[in-house]
Amino acid sequence: MKKLINNPENAVNEMLEGFVKAYPQYVKRLEDLNVIVRSNPKTGKVALVSGGGSGHEPAHAGYVGEGMLDAAVAGEVFTSPTPDQVYEAIKAVDNGKGVLLIIKNYTGDIMNFEMASDMAKDEGIEVEQVVVNDDVAVEDSTYTTGRRGIAGTIFVHKIAGAKAEMGGSLQEVKNVAEKVIKNVKSMGMALTSCTLPAVGKPSFTLGDNEMEIGIGIHGEPGTHRDEIKPADEIVDELLNKIFDNLKLDSGDEVAVMVNGMGATPLMELNIANSRINDVIVNKGIKIVRTYIGNYMTSLDMAGFSITLLKLDDELKELLLYKSNTPALVQF
Amino acid sequence: MKKLINNPENAVNEMLEGFVKAYPQYVKRLEDLNVIVRSNPKTGKVALVSGGGSGHEPAHAGYVGEGMLDAAVAGEVFTSPTPDQVYEAIKAVDNGKGVLLIIKNYTGDIMNFEMASDMAKDEGIEVEQVVVNDDVAVEDSTYTTGRRGIAGTIFVHKIAGAKAEMGGSLQEVKNVAEKVIKNVKSMGMALTSCTLPAVGKPSFTLGDNEMEIGIGIHGEPGTHRDEIKPADEIVDELLNKIFDNLKLDSGDEVAVMVNGMGATPLMELNIANSRINDVIVNKGIKIVRTYIGNYMTSLDMAGFSITLLKLDDELKELLLYKSNTPALVQF
């Protein structure tokens, strides 16, 4: 294992420390908790809480800030955050307008977020939740019943976050989050495995000339392994599966995310985007905005995912609404 | 070699295509050239041109936009752009106020940028240049006489770019760029080699438990190889060498960049930053802004560099001036 870490057992804690030290203008950490909240919280609005296992940085703490999340809860690497941590996050950010939980579809995440939700409701806090399941690769998986939640989750953060910032009610924010979830589909692939700090060896093995199509963000199996192909062929394969699951006609508008898994050079993501753009434009579909970068990673995995979000006027306006978070970008 | 590419010979071209397709709101490509310019150029200002070999993405094309560069010229991977390409960039962005070339200190880059400069001057264009040499690791190197230019270059783009955007004259913009260069120092390390697409095997080999301290962004040798140590010890070693070369006293202000080499997970950069921040703060030095991410990469190398920029009031104001480019970030 070659990692820039100190003690694997303390990696998540040190990561969160390094993160809040870097961005005091955006975020702070709740004392003795793995919960990141805005350093200058906005009140009088619905609060958004997301989170999950660590190892997917900048998800989710990087999206805490103006126009996106109010809190992010970090579990250990690839491990759901505990209910009490999520509960503390809910309590910290609720300001009387209710709290929306944005959960990626993993069995452990759903269980723990729902327990936290029940605890908060017992205290009189209004809590709703949405579950993101954008990964079209497989129906069930190692840690999931139904489809997995992956990079499309960032579009839910962004659009529901904008709706909340604009003053939407809890039900309105939930409704628009559900609309994003219905219209966002993703699929990924890996060239290499990832290695958990505390394990020290790759989670799985791929041959020197092998890739895995439909991989999950924890290295869960995809649809199949194959010989490595040219980037254009890989793009076509992923896009075809997405098109099978997201009805798009000439004249429709989409947002595109080309997401690196953590160890993929930007050069390669740009090369992939050249083909992605061509295929979509050739179908007469209009690309409103493209996002290329590491948005939802899988530790040190090399590979990428493609996400398409079908837009209508409401989603487009919210997508382009101002946000300002430490994670990056031209959102 | 496991890379998401099509034909290695066409990798730079396809990367630039994918890049401009993603960000038409920011950039366009000059026809038949590897030159990226702003899609909505601002006139009546000094124009800034940078560039160099490809493989360092988002440098430099990602920094073309409001408040930073006017043009970036991309050579083949790790290869200086040709003089005629640089010359075309200069001609395209000059609008009568003169052009500043920002060159990283590599022998080939300097030669080719200077040839381009001479060609442009022959046409009556006013051209000045600065050479960035922020890497404190070694005095001379494989491709360099003197110190290499690495991630500190982004601070030159940012601050000189702000000065130009605010209406500074060519001499004023050059002067502030020189001031940044005098006050910015960097040092990096690698856990793994990088692999050039057209070569297909790693540029050098590191043992399973080995790292290289002082590495360059083309995999040029550093100061020494060593057994991998905990992140905190590595940070201390890099920072000590930087402090040897940049006089900082209690009460001074700095900007910090924690730069990933391309394949380094954000988790690890955050862990490194926790220590970086502690060491600097414990010296009584104030951190004005921290930047963590992939700013100046080396293809698929795992590793990172630390950059410190000593600030005065002028540099601080310009650092925090508004910019908007495709590369990212909270600049």
Image (tube, coloured by chain):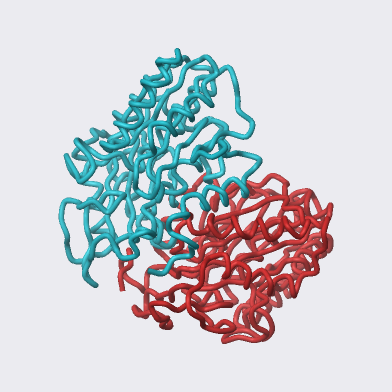
Chain colours: A cyan, B red
The location of residue A264, given as percent across then percent down, is 39, 61
Work out whether residue B292 or residue B322 is closer to the camera in this orientation and state it: B292
Screen quadrant of the N terminus of chain B: bottom left
**Which quadrant would residue A309 be assigned to in this image?**
top left
Residue visible at 68% across and 76% down in the picture = B136
Label tally: 0
A47 versus B185 height, above or below: above
Residue visible at 25% across and 36% down in the picture = A107
Q: Is residue B76 visible?
A: no
A51 versus B281 height, above or below: above
Residue visible at 23% across and 43% down in the picture = A143
Q: Is residue B126 visible?
A: yes
Work out whether residue A220 or residue A284 is closer to the camera in this orientation and state it: A220
Work out whether residue B2 or residue A229 is closer to the camera in this orientation and state it: B2
**Which quadrant would residue A202 be assigned to in this image?**
bottom left
The location of residue B158, given as percent across then percent down, is 68, 56
The location of residue B288, given as percent across then percent down, is 73, 50
Is residue B134 shown left or right of residue A216? right
The location of residue B293, given as percent across then percent down, is 54, 56
Work out whether residue A137 or residue A60 is closer to the camera in this orientation and state it: A60
B306 versus A76 height, above or below: below
